Image: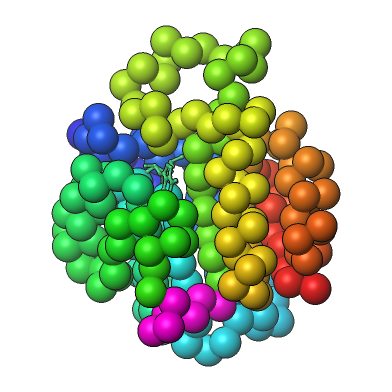
């Protein structure tokens, strides 16, 4: 099936997460950092990324985030990683259908991304953050999507925390991370201990900068 994300149609199979509307705010946040107003009549915000930024999307799934960034910000070099080979196949199809030149890498978080060639100015991620024990969850409605795309241990925070650890060790200057609002305080506190300052939160998206 096809699913619209930020105005473009993406091929979605049972191997990937169905893109969610709340993730579109992550694209708005990237455009804000790049000084590209995304609403008519709004003054351009000040640029917080280099003119030709290197951006890494971790846990790319269908590729909707990485491909949209490349389409909206053609001057960016965009890398996208995922642990799932099946997901990367879908991302490859979408990148080719959208004519978006991005590099796809199989990796557990950032581990296998060759950082000598690639120095990301910004890491973006919508990693699995659902905790199976949340009592408001309708698990039946999530059955069509892969578990690896949805659930994480440690209250849903295990992968996000690990990504923050990796980003901190690599001194990645900026992070945009999606998580459920009920997790935001814990993530901000954890990130602060790892050297990241919370700049703002929009919807589901935490915007953080290396101190
Ligand atoms: C919530 S989905 C997000 C997909 C897509 N970025 C989106 O926003 O629609 C999370 C993605 O992270 C991937 N993933 C899960 N564990 C991972 C890991 N350890 N390293 C890298 N990717 C992982 C899953 O395969 C899945 O594609």
Give 112 or 135, whichever is nearer the viewer: 112
Q: Position of residue 148 (x, y in %)?
A: 39, 33
Q: Quadrant of ligand 1?
A: top left
Q: Is residue 181 above or below residue 119?
A: above
Regarding residue 37, the answer to whether it shows in the image is: no
Q: Is residue 198 above or below residue 119?
A: above
* The magenta segment: 115-121
Residue positioned 25% across, 73% down in the render: 101
Q: Is residue 104 above or below residue 131?
A: below
Q: Which image quarter: residue 102?
A: bottom left
Locate residue 79 relative to residue 98 in the image: left or right.
Answer: right
Residue positioned 58% across, 61% down in the render: 166
Q: Position of residue 138 (x, y in %)?
A: 51, 12
Q: Position of residue 194 (x, y in %)?
A: 76, 61
Residue positioned 52% across, 53% down in the render: 125
Q: Which image quarter: residue 111?
A: bottom left
Locate residue 167 relative to residue 138 in the image: left or right.
Answer: right
Regarding residue 155, the answer to whether it shows in the image is: yes
Q: Reply yes or no: does residue 117 show up in magenta.
A: yes
Q: Quadrant of the N terminus?
A: top left
Q: Which image quarter: residue 40?
A: bottom right
């Amino acid at each position: 099936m096809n699913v619209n994300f930020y105005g473009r149609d993406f091929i979605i199979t049972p191997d990937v997460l169905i893109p969610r509307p709340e993730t579109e705010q992550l694209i708005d946040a990237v455009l804000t950092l790049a000084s590209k107003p995304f609403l008519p009549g709004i003054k351009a915000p000040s640029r917080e990324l280099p003119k030709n930024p290197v951006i890494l999307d971790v846990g790319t799934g269908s590729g909707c985030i990485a491909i949209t960034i490349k389409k909206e910000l053609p001057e960016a070099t965009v890398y996208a990683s995922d642990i799932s080979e099946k997901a990367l196949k879908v991302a490859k199809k979408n990148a080719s259908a959208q004519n978006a030149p991005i590099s796809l890498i199989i990796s557990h978080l950032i581990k296998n991304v060759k950082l000598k060639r690639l120095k990301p100015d910004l890491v973006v991620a919508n990693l699995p953050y659902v905790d199976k024990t949340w009592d408001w969850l309708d698990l039946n409605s999530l059955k069509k999507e892969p578990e690896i795309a949805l659930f994480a241990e440690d209250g849903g925070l295990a992968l996000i925390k690990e990504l923050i650890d990796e980003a901190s060790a690599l001194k990645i200057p900026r992070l945009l991370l999606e998580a459920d609002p009920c997790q935001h305080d814990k993530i901000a506190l954890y990130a602060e201990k790892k050297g990241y300052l919370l700049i703002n939160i929009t919807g589901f998206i935490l915007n953080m900068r290396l101190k």
